[in-house]
Image: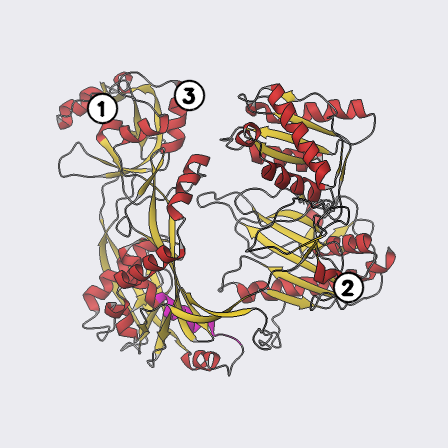
Amino acid sequence: QSSVAQPKAEAPQQPPPDGGKRCAGKRRGGRGRARPAEGPRPAPGPAVEPATRAVIGPPVPSKGLSFCRRPGFGTVGARCVVKANHFLAEIPDKDLTQYDVKITPEVTSRCVNRAIIAELVRLYRESDLGMRLPAYDGRKSLYTAGALPFDAREFVVRLTDEDSGTGVPPREREYRVVIKFAARADLHHLRQFIAGRQADAPQEAVQVLDIVLRELASQRYVAIGRSFYSPDIRRPQRLGDGLQSWCGFYQSLRPTQMGLSLNIDMSSTAFIEALPVIDFVAQILGKDVMSRPLSDANRIKIKKALRGVKVEVTHRENVRRKYRISGVTAQPTHELIFPIDDQMNMKSVVEYFKEMYGFTIQQSHLPCLMVGNQKKANYLPMEACKIVEGQRYTKRLNEKQITSLLKVTCQRPREKEMDILQTVHQNGYDQDPYAKEFGINISEKLTSVEARVLPAPWLKYHDAGKEKECLPQVGQWNMVNKKVINGGKVSHWACINFSRSVQETTARGFCQELAQMCQISGMEFNSEPVLPIYSARPDQVAKALKHVYNVALHKLKGKELELLLAILPDNNGALYGDIKRICETDLGLISQCCLTKHVFKISKQYLANVSLKINVKMGGRNTVLVDALSWRIPLVSDIPTIIFGADVTHPETGEDSSPSIAAVVASQDWPEVTKYAGLVCAQAHRQELIQDLYKTWHDPQRGTVTGGMVRELLISFRKATGQKPQRIIFYRDGVSEGQFYQVLLYELDAIRKVGCTSYFLMYMF
């Protein structure tokens, strides 16, 4: 999605204090969700007292704010018809009614909430609910096709607790459920929108219908976000280290120009395999654990892997109690004793299981699992436990697991089409009782859509190369006989080798080949490093980086170390992220990482690709569009234009305290719009609104001061181009439909405030 805002000048004000965001003028922003971006530097806050800083509040909603209407349809390129993974849906002609739901005592688990409402429907559907089959969102809202026979009513539901995994026996609880009329969903406006007679889609009505179509799937499958997973959809594939991939599908109802459409796509994610715990441990350690005790290092590794995992006991015949693992004992099972009464009479775990359950512990050299309350943990032998099925793995996958998962998910279009059609058939929307209740009909045919294959743009390279212009073929081209249009300069560089398997001579040869390729590509690149290649252990990354940096600075006598090459092991864990973090935030140093496998198997194509990355990081430009040079790009070439891009990356599921990271990039040249600067900023956990686009804070000397990421990038554009941008094009990624209007109102308001308070600075440079 994009928005366009025209900045306006106001009376001059003071710029923010030094120490604000650093604009990475020599870097090019990238998408890069899978791993940290190579370029942007962090954005530290202003050098004022934290207590005096304030950010802007939410904007006042504008009644006049609406989407621009589509001006027409494209004409360029070869026309064709493609199949889209959309299935048209008929809008029901029934009245949809929303009710508020309040459950007492309050429940935080959606799963438990659903179980309570399911029991309520089972008990009262034929009586108090007037034969209605409601759809429930798992929280505070319930929807029906037609009104219920009451406006408000209280129900009593008794339900046996789901096994909490703490060791406390499940017990029956009584819940009071109040259902109260809230509103009627407006399907008339939805029909008007689809017919093109209304500009904005009524998200509430679409959301209700989406919840209805998700109701049955929520009961059948494991729901994660908008996707559903099951081992029955496709046979799970092992990923290694006790993990397996489960196949699933993404489902979302969307308004389109052809009407309402159900978007279905295939999905895969990692689950913990439902193995006996001893087998899981053997996979984690990669060896048989039946014969000898675990070392401290292996025990800690197992503890990290098992903490939080749910297991069920297997030593009690038909009793399959569930527990959540809190840790692993430091001692082997045969050394564990515990008090059996208030007189502190002790008994060993081995004796207890033999006397209480007739269970003989065979692997007493292994530690026990600690389950339940941390203060009063219970001990369970590993061999008496099995991992409960259906637990998603929320930690970071290693390289081998990522490769295995990619192999599972990579499909040819025809294979994917067949899987999607099979999924729609298995879901049986025509037999879905909730879809029937609400009068929703889903087509089982893929939607045919008119499309166009756009012509590739001509690329301009340096005139010193044999090929000065290039037309990509099927999205591909190479650097043979070409030179980058603007080559960067690297006079002072160094290399650190973190890979034990790479000898110094091999590393030196690789660096020489890379330096030569950078020169061939059109860069000014010194063939010799400032220092001999430095070898270091991965667990001493900070020490190694700072040592090389300081020694280089001493040798250069005031000149800057411009580039650091780093050779990494193929499976490097957190090493890559540590290097980027330290180089960007502590040292202010540009870095380029290379894997061991590429060092041993040097290919010209790989070296050329790396040289292009280095050139951009060093402030060069690899290529520009011929159309840009000839002023033929609509909405860009006519007046000085700056293009922004923004996204927010959130912590992985299960990381409750880590901040979200907002990244904003902006073009730094015109009319080419090829060179970008970037800023990154930490903000509140899972906050999608970018807080620092515009901000104010109080300075003791100057009073209220304004600033923010947009302001810094506007100033950087002015310095780089000598032009005052007269148009802002802002691309915003990663916003869900439910948050779109909130983000649009807040962030567009922030951009406009920057234009109104800071645009005058463009005249100061």
Q: How far apart are marks 1 and 2 (CA)?
A: 80 Å
As drawn, 225 above or below 235: below
From the image, tell me which residue sits under label 2: 640
User: Percent x, y for residue 278?
Assistant: 27, 28
User: Percent x, y for residue 87?
Assistant: 37, 69
Q: Which colour scheme is used?
A: secondary structure
Q: Give the camera-side residue of 575 and 459.
A: 459
Q: Residue at horizontal 50%, vertical 61%? A: 736
Q: Name the kind of residue labelled 3 in the image.
A: Ala
Q: Quadrant of residue 490?
A: top right
Q: Give the camera-side residue of 579 and 362.
A: 579
221 sits to left or right of 60: left
Q: Name the kind of residue labelled 1 in the image.
A: Ile
Please give the label number shown on residue 667: none
Q: What stretch is highlighted in magenta?
A: 200-211
Whether pointer 1 and pointer 2 mark residues with C-beta atoms closer than 8 Å, the reply is: no
Point out the tag, 3 or 1, that comes first from the N-terminus: 3
Please give the label number shown on residue 297: 3
215 sits to left or right of 546: left
User: Percent x, y for residue 585?
Assistant: 67, 37
Residue 203: say if magenta.
yes
Furthest-right residue in this view = 764
From the image, tell me which residue sits under label 1: 340
Q: Name the kind of residue labelled 2 in the image.
A: Pro
Point out the tag, 1 or 2, that comes first from the N-terminus: 1
User: Percent x, y for residue 740?
Assistant: 54, 64
Residue 349: say if magenta.
no
